[in-house]
């Protein structure tokens, strides 16, 4: 599949959302992050940031996996398994090691500078290896290895180029299937719990979307996706978004116990599992069509940002935490700090990535 400008630009947007997502957790959204200045509570700002993160979580990492899957089949066929895996180890494995051994412990240390509990001195008990947000390239490396093994066992498997676009009924079946798989997974590994650094509770959609990307590559589904179909599913997404807070309100009326979205079988966990794909499908589809129609042309600045996006993803954690802790004494509203720190973190992360890319050995990995 030929690389298109709009896909690189969509990665730029998604990288920015990742940085704002983690900034939102810093200032009151629900979720896990290295540094939290404000706890999640019943305030309007905290609830708004939590909804922002929930919507983000439903689609943005899944979109990354979909885009990654688009290029895997062609790269494997062109380079062969040995070269393909060697390049994957460099581009995915080296950043994981660099973050885990250096940037991750540095981020933990920076977070402790403003840790009110002072539970551990800054330099004591630093993690020997901190995966942090680099779980994503670690996952992609595992997925890539899995795809190579799959093709090794089924070498003659060929995807039909003229396969019709999936119908809306197929989209709905996929949403229900992914929701059910997520619900089942979370009985074993609840959201927030990790296995080998991976929150498997979210992996039903990640595996599906990566596989969809691999299948869509030769079937040309992304290029054939129409705005009417994307618009229909965007409407579904917009209608689905308020269902989650409605479910929270209903569950609170039924029971005074805290609501558990992480796992188990209750109104909150069941709603959350099926809510995610219903929100994700339309947002991802709309972004693909809009970016393909409006941003698929050469532009020096966008092309530069596209080259910097992966590096910005790798380095954003210590930068975001450093900026947050540096301005922790500023008594501004949470939403103001979220907007300002998030913007500064995006700009700084892309700038640092650009500086790093001046080194040829860094270019091989980023």
Image (cartoon, rainbow, N blue to C red):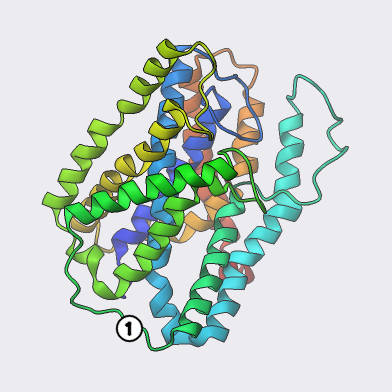
- 217 relative to 256, above or below: below
SS label for mark 1: loop
Residue at coordinates 55% horizontally, 41% vertically from top-left? 187
Residue at coordinates 38% horizontally, 79% vertically from top-left? 74
Q: Can residue 13 be seen in this view?
A: no
Residue 237 versus residue 131: which sits nearer the camera?
A: 237
10 Å neighbourhood of mark 1: few (<14), some, or many (≥20)? few
- Residue 321 spot, x, y in % from top left: 64, 35
- Residue 307 spot, x, y in % from top left: 45, 61
- 282 relative to 209, above or below: above
Residue 208 versus residue 87: which sits nearer the camera?
A: 208
Q: Quadrant of the N terminus?
A: bottom left
Residue at coordinates 56% horizontally, 32% vertically from top-left? 31
Q: Which residue is at the far front?
A: 265
Specify whether 192 is left or right of 310: right
Residue at coordinates 44% horizontally, 40% vertically from top-left? 57
- Residue 13 spot, x, y in % from top left: 38, 47
Circle count? 1
Reading the image, the residue beneath label 1 is: 158
- 327 relative to 208, above or below: above
- Residue 202 spot, x, y in % from top left: 49, 46
Specify whether 289 is left or right of 183: left
Residue 103 versus residue 196: which sits nearer the camera?
A: 196
Q: In which quarter of the image is residue 208?
A: bottom left
Q: Quadrant of the C terminus?
A: bottom right
Q: Which residue is at the far left?
A: 228
Specify whether 231 is left or right of 52: left
Q: Can residue 154 be seen in this view?
A: yes
């Amino acid at each position: 599949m030929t690389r298109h400008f709009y896909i690189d630009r969509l990665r730029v947007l998604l990288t920015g959302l990742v940085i704002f997502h983690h900034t939102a957790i810093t200032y009151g959204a629900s979720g896990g992050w290295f540094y939290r200045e404000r706890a999640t509570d019943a305030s309007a700002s905290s609830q708004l940031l939590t909804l922002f993160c929930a919507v983000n979580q439903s689609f943005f990492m899944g979109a990354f996996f979909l885009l990654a899957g688009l290029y895997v089949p062609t790269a494997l066929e062109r380079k062969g398994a040995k070269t393909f895996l060697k390049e994957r180890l460099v581009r995915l494995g080296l950043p994981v090691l660099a973050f885990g051994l250096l940037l991750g412990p540095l981020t933990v240390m920076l977070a402790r500078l403003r840790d009110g509990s002072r539970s551990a001195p800054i330099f004591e008990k630093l993690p020997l290896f901190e995966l942090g947000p680099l779980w994503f390239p670690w996952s992609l490396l595992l997925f890539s290895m899995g795809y190579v093994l799959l093709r090794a066992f089924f070498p003659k498997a060929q995807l039909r180029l003229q396969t019709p676009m999936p119908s809306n009924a197929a989209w709905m079946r996929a949403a229900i299937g992914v929701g059910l798989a997520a619900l089942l997974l979370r009985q074993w590994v609840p959201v927030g719990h990790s296995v080998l650094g991976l929150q498997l509770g979210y992996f039903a959609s990640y595996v599906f979307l990566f596989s969809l990307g691999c299948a869509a590559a030769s079937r040309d589904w992304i290029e054939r996706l129409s705005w009417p179909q994307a618009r229909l599913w965007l409407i579904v997404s917009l209608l689905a978004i308020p269902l989650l807070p409605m479910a929270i309100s209903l569950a609170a009326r039924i029971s005074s116990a805290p609501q558990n979205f992480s796992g188990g079988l209750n109104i909150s966990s069941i709603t959350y599992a099926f809510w995610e794909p219903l929100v994700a499908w339309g947002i991802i589809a709309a972004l693909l069509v809009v970016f393909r129609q409006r941003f698929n042309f050469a532009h020096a600045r966008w092309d530069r940002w596209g080259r910097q996006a992966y590096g910005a993803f790798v380095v954003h954690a210590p930068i975001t935490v450093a900026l947050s802790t540096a301005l922790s004494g500023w008594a501004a509203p949470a939403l103001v700090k979220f907007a300002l720190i998030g913007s500064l973190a995006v700009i700084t992360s892309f700038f640092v990535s650009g500086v790093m890319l001046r080194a040829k050995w860094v270019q091989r990995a980023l």
